[in-house]
Amino acid sequence: MNVGKIIKIKSYEKVEYVVRRHGITFASYLLIFIFLIGIPLVIYGLFYQAFANLTQSPVVFPLTILATSAYFLSIFLFFYSFFVEFYLDCWIITNDRLIDVRQISLFARTVAEVDLYQIQDVSSEVKGFFPTIFKYGNVYLQTAGPVPKFVLNNVPHPDQLRQAIIQLASEDKKFHT
């Protein structure tokens, strides 16, 4: 994704991080997708064994193909929309501000930003078995700006990201005091 198409970079600004959710958080959608793809194959195998002569009918066979195609098309469409939302949700951290890009649906996006000097508190949270094993979690930013709290959900290495944001915020506060 080209950051310049989403936000206008200031002349003195440099993109430090582009952070997305950890890839393992998409695995549940992938498992559901694989399971849903397998359902018609199992149903066809059971139906073919029970009613072998009916599956060769000139009326039933085309209707089966049509229904299965519509089913697969809807599964791929839903999976694609989940993937787009997963991939296009990101947080852009520059040396001056943090930009939260939320992809709400295929054709809806919200962008919020906060200046780093307005950040008052940064905390990270790793909670649960899988987040601990795969090293992902949430980063919470408390600000003095119009958006009081930013949440970076399921980001990789939240402790390192928290430290980096604290360091960038302290460097940015030098220019605003």
Image: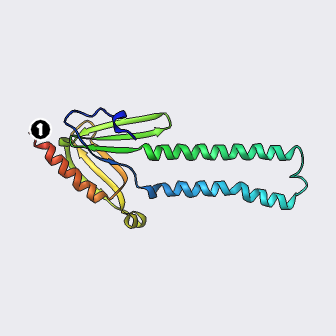
Residue visible at 31% across and 57% down? 158
Q: Which of the 4 image quadrants contains residue 46? A: bottom right
Looking at the rendered image, the quarter that the N terminus falls into is top left
Q: Where is residue 94 in the image (x, y as percent from the top left)?
A: 25, 43
The residue closer to the viewer here, 140 or 166, is: 166
Q: Whole-percent x and y of residue 143?
A: 23, 43
Q: Please tell me which residue is depicted at 59% across the width and 53% down the height of the picture.
A: 33
Q: Which amino acid does label 1 sit on?
A: His
Chosen colour scheme: rainbow
Position of 164 relative to 93 (above/below):
below
- Residue furthest to the left: 177
Residue 8 location (% of width, % of height): 29, 32
Element under disc 1: loop
- Quarter of image, res 157: bottom left
Q: Is residue 142 left or right of residue 66?
A: left
Closer to the camera in the image, 128 or 173 = 173
Apparent side of residue 55 relative to residue 67 in the rendered image (left or right): right
User: Residue at point 67% right, 57% down?
Assistant: 38
Number of callouts: 1
Disc 1 packing (10 Å; few <14; some 14–19; many ≥20): few
Disc 1: which residue: 176
Which x, y percent locates residue 39?
69, 56
Quarter holding the C terminus is: top left
